[in-house]
Amino acid sequence: MASRRSQLLVALSLVVGLRAEAQGEAREEQAARLYDAGVAAHDRGDFAAAARSFAEADQLLPNDVTLETALREALRADQPVLGMRLHARARRALSPAPSLRAAMSEVLANFGERVSWLRVDCDDCEAQLGEETLELAKDTPVEPGPQTLLLSIGVTRERVEINLQPGEHKRVRPGDNAAPGPTPPTNEGPSSGLHPAWLTIGIVPTVVFGAAALGSFIQASSLEGQLADKRALNQLDGAEEIKRDGESAEVRIYAFTALTAVSAIVTGALAIWAVDWSGGSAQVGVSLNGATAKIAF
């Protein structure tokens, strides 16, 4: 019984091996036919068909020479999507030949920003884009523009309408139509903090108080000089008044300097913690003697 079982296993192994060998030979023959078709298409000037044939031949029987030829034909045919898919495939080579690296660089430079990248993340589903079935959980180069993606999960069908921009990487999951992702912020509408324009309310008084402190300092220095001159000449007429004016100017210096510091600290705190620097619309109203002006930012 054991001997018979062993004979059966050997026979099955031979059958499997012969079948695998036959399949390998069939792949080689089909790849050779596709390669010949690519050469013929190139000779008649149909570079798009040549690129497709060489790409299919490489997919059946991976070969760096065939892949490089497909990349070159995609460049001649100006086929960005096919070119970038071949570029992704070319990264399989651990040590690509210099000519293959050059073709990859040329494809990336010419097509890298002319395709969109679509990734579908879902479990046990099928993603159909037009007539093509996309590979799941993989960034696939596709044509930019409006696209309809059909997701099939068992008997459930879901249509996802997307508009892809050149160079955009888009990730789609089931239910995206019902629950779209967050939209990027714009400069319209209310923001979460104060508009930067409101800082003018703090900057203006800071500048005014600073200028007043500087003016008071200049006045005090001038009065001190006048008082020194009068004392040097022993002219005491008006000296007491100049002294009082000088002391008053010194008091204003201290007061305006303190106000400048406080205003600058408050303005700085607003700039750090209260202002939304992402932008948005704001209106600042200024009233002067009953007249009101509103400025929109």
Image: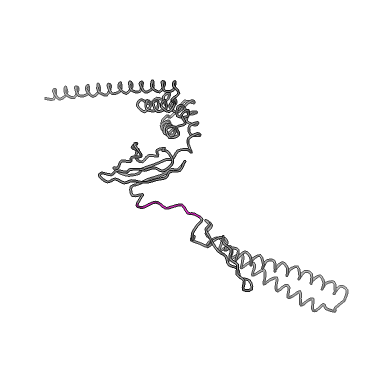
Residue 150 in view in this figure:
yes
> The N terminus appears in which quarter of the rendering?
top left
Left or right side of 137 for 248 = right
Report the span colored magenta. 178-186
* Horizontal and vertical percent position of residue 280: 52, 58
x 46%, y 52%: residue: 184
Image position, residue 99 (x, y; %): 48, 25
Q: Position of residue 202 (x, y in %)?
A: 60, 65
Please tell me which residue lies in front, 147 or 115. Answer: 147
Identify the residue at horizontal 28%, vertical 44% (top origin).
Answer: 153
Colour scheme of the rendered structure: one colour
Q: Give the percent coordinates (x, y) of residue 250.
A: 72, 72
- Please check the rendered image and state whether residue 206 is part of the magenta-colored stretch, yes or no: no
Residue 229, placed above or below residue 150 = below
Dominant secondary structure, magenta:
loop
Q: Is residue 265 left or right of residue 125?
A: right
- For the C terminus, the quadrant is bottom right
- The quarter holding residue 136 reads top left
Image height of 135 relative to 186, above or below: above
Is residue 95 visible to the viewer in this orientation of the structure?
no
Give the residue furthest to the right. 233
